[in-house]
Image (cartoon, rainbow, N blue to C red):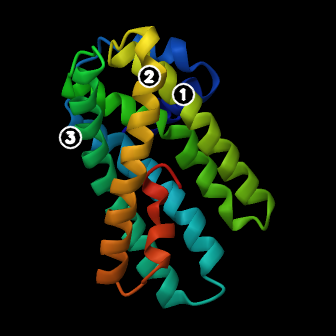
Amino acid sequence: MDFAKLINTVKEIILEPKNAFTKRKEEKEPWMNLLVNYVLILVAISAIGSFLSMIGWSASWAIRSLIMQLIIGVVNFIILMYLMQALSKSFGGNGDLEQSAKTIAYSLTPSWVGSFFTFIPFLGWLIALAGLIYSLYVLYHAILIFMDVPKDKSVGYEIIFIIVSIVVMAVVGFTLGAIFGLGFLGAGAMHGGWRF
């Protein structure tokens, strides 16, 4: 794993998303490689922030939540990738699975990075919220560049995608939360997704 490359990619996506996406559009990277070498690391960074904020309450609760967030992050990435691919065809996009994986992974980057700071009282949640909002902006550009959705359909596509993904992530979060015995908090552990 090339951590210097990972850090450079994260920095480019946060500071210059359009340029970063244009540069990476033609890169051939199977979605499984992106999952292992990028998504899993950023989901872990996000989960560690939440772990640090919970460790004071209960170590066992924090550990179960950390494991659940990693699982939910991976499951959400895969589900959202296929959802992005399926919906893109309805909005004139390319329906390419690799490009869909890039769209999800790279647009979630600001949210994952911002989520790390949740262990800082109050300010951390503001940073996480800013990361989420910025992820929605980045998603818009990712849709245009990676999915080739026409500009006049891109806002509708993003809105429909977000609505459907909220429902899907809630179901995944509640289901895995029940399995891990974290109940309703399971929905809050969707840090591996859009952080809603």
In three-dimensional space, the C-alpha distance between marks 2 and 3, rounded to whole angstroms, equals: 19 Å
Where's residue 135, x and y in %? 56, 36
Judge left or right: residue 122 versus residue 71. right
Which circle, 1 or 3, is nearer the viewer? Answer: 1
Say which label, 2 or 3, has the lower sequence index.
3
Element assignment for label 1: helix
Query: In the rendered image, is residue 36 in sight?
Result: no
Q: Is residue 64 left or right of residue 141?
A: left
Q: Work out whether residue 7 or residue 110 is closer to the camera in this orientation and state it.
A: 110
Residue depicted at x 29% and y 29%: 100
Residue 42, percent across and down?
Answer: 46, 48
Q: Mark 2, residues whose alpha carbon is within 10 Å: few (<14), some, or many (≥20)?
A: many
Residue at which label 2 appears: 142
Q: Is residue 161 left or right of residue 88?
A: right
Residue flagged by tag 1: what amino acid is it? Val
Q: Which is nearer the N-term, disc 1 or disc 3?
A: 3
Question: Mark 2 belongs to which amino acid?
Answer: Ala
**Residue with the mark numbered 1:** 138
Q: Is residue 170 above or below residue 147?
A: below
Q: Which residue is mark 3?
A: 32
94 versus 163 height, above or below: above
Q: Amino acid at mark 3?
A: Met
Image-quadrant location for residue 116: bottom right
| Percent of width and height locating residue 55 | 60, 82
- Asked if the residue at tag 1 contacts the one at tag 2, i.e. Cβ–Cβ closer than 8 Å, the answer is yes
Asked whether 151 or 32 is in front, the reply is 151
Q: Nearer the viewer, mark 2 or mark 3?
A: 2
